[in-house]
Image (spheres, rainbow, N blue to C red):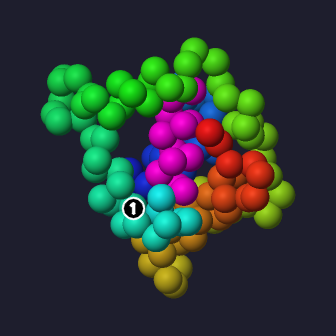
Amino acid sequence: MHGLTVLTYHLQHPSLTKPWYQLFGARVFQRVFQQGEDWGDVLMETHPRGIGRRADAAVARLKAAAGPTMPSWVVSHPIAGELTIATIDPDAWPGPEQQVLAWARSVAEQRYLRSGDEPR
């Protein structure tokens, strides 16, 4: 759940990331929320093999594909109706896991799954 939380937060705050991370996040969200893949499996595909080691070739390809500037499709402002981390209440029902998933789905729907707005 931590990985999905960090990813979602950074996709809503692109100034805290590099272009490759936005491309990575968009692809993860498309695979998870459009194609129905398990978010944990998708995130682990490009997870570095260990502390202090280089990320695998998939991350290197993402970095090269994204280039040095933020893609034009990245939304850098809040979107009306999109959930935020502030909506997560660890004591509320359903538990925080379902709330984080709903938040991530909201970000995916508002930023990456709209017809014609999909990242390259």
Q: Is residue 90 left or right of residue 19?
A: left
76 left or right of 85 in image? right
Q: Quadrant of the N terminus?
A: bottom left
Residue that appears at 65% across and 25% down: 70
- Location of residue 42 (image quadrant): bottom left
The answer to whether residue 22 is magenta is: yes
Q: Is residue 89 visible?
A: no
Residue 12 part of the magenta segment: no
Where is residue 55, by image quadrant?
Answer: top left
Depth check: give the residue in front, 99 or 54.
54
At numbered mark 1, what does the secondary structure look like: helix, strand or loop?
helix
41 shown above or below 54: below
Name the residue nearer the viewer: 75 or 120: 120
Give x and y (percent) for residue 72.
Answer: 74, 30
Q: Which residue is mark 1?
A: 39
Could you tell me the amino acid type at mark 1?
A: Trp
Q: Residue at x 30, y 59 (%)?
A: 41
Q: Position of residue 88 (x, y in %)?
A: 56, 65
Q: Residue furthest right?
A: 80
Q: Quadrant of the C terminus?
A: top right
Numbered marks: total: 1
On screen, 86 above or below 102?
A: above
Please tell me which residue lies in front, 79 or 63: 63
Image x and y of residue 11, in percent: 59, 43
In this picture, which residue range is highlighted in magenta?
19-30
